[in-house]
Image: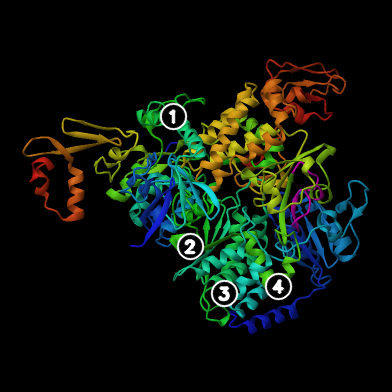
Amino acid sequence: MGVINSIEQLEEYRRELAATAKPDLPTVLVCFGTGCQANGSRLVANAFMEIIKEQGLQVDVNIGIKTTGCHGYCENGPLVALRPQDILYLKVKPEDVPEIVEESVKGGRIVERLVYRDKVTDEIVPRYSEIPFYKHQLRIALRHIGTIDPTSIDDYILAGGYAGLAKALRMEPEDIISEVERSGLRGRGGAGFPTGTKWRSCAAVDSDVRYVMCNGDEGDPGAFMDRSIMEGDPHAVIEGMIIGAYAVGSRQGYIYVRDEYPLAIRNLTTAIEAAREKGLLGENILGTGFSFDIKISRGGGAFVCGESSALMRSVEGNVGEPRAKYIRSVERGLYNKPTVLNNVETWANVPEIILKGAEWYASMGTEGSKGTKVFSLVGKVNNTGLVEVPMGISIRELVENIGGGVLGGKKFKAVQTGGPSGGCIPERLADLPIDFDSLTEAGSMMGSGGIIVMDEDTCMVDVAKYFTGFLVEESCGKCTPCRDGLPRIYDLLTEVTEGRGREEHLDMLEELCDLLTWGALCGLGTSAANPVLSTVKYFRDEYEAHIRDKKCPAGVCKALITYSIDPEACTGCRLCAKNCPQNCITGKRKEAHVIDTSKCIKCGVCKDVCAFDAVRIS
Amino acid sequence: MKEMTQIQDVSRFDRIIDRYERSEESLLAILQDFQREFHYVPEEGIRRLSEVMGVPASKIYAMGTFYKALSLTPRGRHTIKVCTGTACHLKGAPQILETLERELRVKRNGTTEDGEFTLECVNCVGACAMAPVTLVDEVYHGKTRPSKVMDIVRKQVEG
Amino acid sequence: MEKISVVIDGRTFEAEKDTCVLEVARRNGIYIPSLCYNSEVTSSGGSCRVCLVEAHQGGRMRLVTSCNYPVRKGLEVKTDTPLVHRIRRGVLELLLARVPDSEVIREMAAAEGVTEVRFRKDEGENERYKCIACALCVNVCAEVVGVHAIAMVERGADKKPATPYNKPSDVCIGCGACAYACPTGAIELKEKDGVRRIWHKDFKMVRCSVCGTPYIPEAQVDWIVSKTGKDRSFFDKCPDHRF
């Protein structure tokens, strides 16, 4: 079908798709997210295609192969899901494929060695929906990810896509805004500004031109939900934006995508073209007289462009420098026209809210933070990946129940949330509910939802230095506190981590943090002190250990540690000596080895290669 | 360092410029295409773009210095990117970076003398579950280790 | 034009809508230091942060740069509070660490009681040694002169004004407006034997036919002639002998 000319035709088209679809058709879903592709999912998919062709299975057993977006459980990729059996296979290699086809696809049996195994009970959990990582999740923004082919608009429509838009186009714009307001949806990009309020302010400004924009410049290190949505369900973002455009009266939209996400750019481009062909974008959408189109802007590798005013400057074709927001972008944004800018996850929620209603959405979450939130649970945790849960879940539940606890049975020390604008929350506050307000109160922030788990081997001074270093590189350099203050903070933290720290450095750090918080121009600068302030607040003893005792308790800061070999554990295999780039490890075969610490550069290679865990850091 | 050879033939720039709308909105995308085509943004390219679009060269040059995806000096034939996102940092990215700096005898964001490799850091490629991540010419390698990273690089480059 | 009344340090003033707080304060004899702002350049301001003041409105207080914060109904500004001075001192200490040789910064810092820098000072190098990267030169060149010879390049601590590739600019007319506007005198403008050197480029000067003083670069005359259609002979004499 070419252009869909009316809302009725859209529904008819969906029925047609449903009639030809074969829900019982065995389908192999191979994850094609960035993570799984890196682990070789393309080879796995090819192996399936080959074997199907070879065995002529389309006659015998008809199989559909589908490449999907990111399932989120990237840790265990490449992931292969089987429908309708609801089986999830982990870490699949091309050589596993014949067995999967033989046993599962044809025989309906489970290949035990490839399914999830509970780390504690050792029980196998073959069903996708029963795996603890998925069981506790409630997927709204991620609703289609891993189940539809992101490059197929038919797949999206068959799954119920564009029904939210169809409903919206029958509503008054004013009613759509009210619906979004009543849902309690707050911006998923960081600050948590109420989405409906933003739309209303924009719609209220007298102007002939208005823009809606999508912020896909997901810059917080450790957060990748927006990448996953753009790659895995691009139409959800597009549908949300069309609804938003209709609500505020915009004819042109922009999606700003991070340069580091080539697959997201590709899938969004494909999706926009498909939506145009179907008459869902462009002139006279679904015959309603409403017209709207979307352009993609590719970022250039600048974290600050995630800041709204910098993003708009970048889209206009400039250096991405923020400007003072004394006049809000809903009044004067892109090209000085009223502009609604929401992030990827926010837009992806919109169609569902319109379709199912504000009350449904507001029934989830907490008083001040409604609905669900996608988190990327990464760092020193067993199950890493994307997790969507109702707002208000505690940090501990997230880390323990879904994340399966800290990696290697180590001690849970803290989580970092909110990226470089956020802070570290210690384990003793882990029962804190995760929502916009509690995280801010604890000195961190929601940010885009990165949750980085830290264990006893993580040095908090090093973490503060890491984020400050990140921001030194990413500061645009426009205002004095950020441009010249951050390097001074970095200097001080370097002094501390290299054993030259003095007591007064802590006060100086706090002074500089105060200066940034009050004096910087944009959000990047005013929040840049959070990583330092939160670690000083919760882990002051670690700073003091570096300063007073010249010790790094976590064994991270190179200047304060020494490597040695435990003679008890060393088997004299010589592997470390062979790999040492300094040739400073000596010892006879089958005898304990010794590191010459005067030559050691603490590169960590010996520890990395030792199979007997004999290399110690003190 | 590779020799900076002058690119005299402006049609090579024009072919890229012509793919885009004559609007300042296209500048960044055009510069990125220059980067892809020439492995850097050549000075002649900036001057040509300024001429064709009627945008001051100073402004385009500023963009070239501001955006990390753009480089004003030629990059190596192969680009190695060490992800220095938070998860990668915690899981040993600094050691990976140090190893590569030592073995390739080049500092971060530098290019080896023979023009073979450029070593870059990238702030999170969104593949945190595979931390630490190293990219060799845009191919992702997860869970890289200091002792193995050079093997990975050699294996991929030598095919 | 709509008039708005605004309170600054307890006194009420009338001002035109969209006027910035700094202008209103200055007109009424209230001193607020400032570096990157020039009232003739609308794109200037907002970067150096020395003009921060407390803005109280709707029960909320924040620090804003008075050079680009427009007066609004119900706005109360405080320019002389402990917070304002604390943050200003911090900004000036950073600037002093950056350009310890700048007389202007030393004086402004001393006025706030900042004479010592506790942080690592920047190495004085090239034209950056007095530059505070405030972008006023770039804004003047683009907005007032209209030639866009220079731009703010790089990012973070390396941010600075420059011509493309630090080479003589094709479009620079040598007018020197950037150097005259620079709050710290960081831009080098040299004249010798009827030749002006600025931004790595030499400009032949036109001499006044009366006094013989070289007073304007030929390139600038070309520029004005092409833009305004003024007769070239107008520039035979310097302003002192023109009429």
Q: Do labels 1 and 3 touch, CB within 8 Å?
A: no
Q: Do labels 2 and 1 touch, CB within 8 Å?
A: no
Give me the chain letter of mark 2: A
Say if labels 3 and 2 share a chain. Answer: yes
Residue type beneath disc 2? Glu
Say if labels 3 and 4 share a chain. Answer: yes
Estimate the spatial distance between the alpha carbons at disc 3 and disc 2, rounded to whole Å: 33 Å
Residue type beneath disc 3? Glu
Q: Secondary structure at mark 3?
A: helix
Q: In the displayed structure, does residue A316 sit left or right of residue A9?
A: left
The stretch of residues the image draws in magenta is: A379-397
Q: Secondary structure at mark 4?
A: loop
Say if labels 1 and 3 share a chain. Answer: no
Estimate the spatial distance between the alpha carbons at disc 3 and disc 4, rounded to whole Å: 29 Å
* Tag in front: 3 or 4: 4
Q: Secondary structure at mark 2?
A: loop
Residue drawn 58% across and 36% down? A513
Local packing at callout 2 (Cα closer than 10 Å; few below 14, some 14-19, many 20+) is many
Task: Looking at the picture, tell me which residue is in the foreground, A210 or A35.
Answer: A210
Q: Could you say where residue C135 lies in the image, as x and y percent from the top left? A: 38, 42
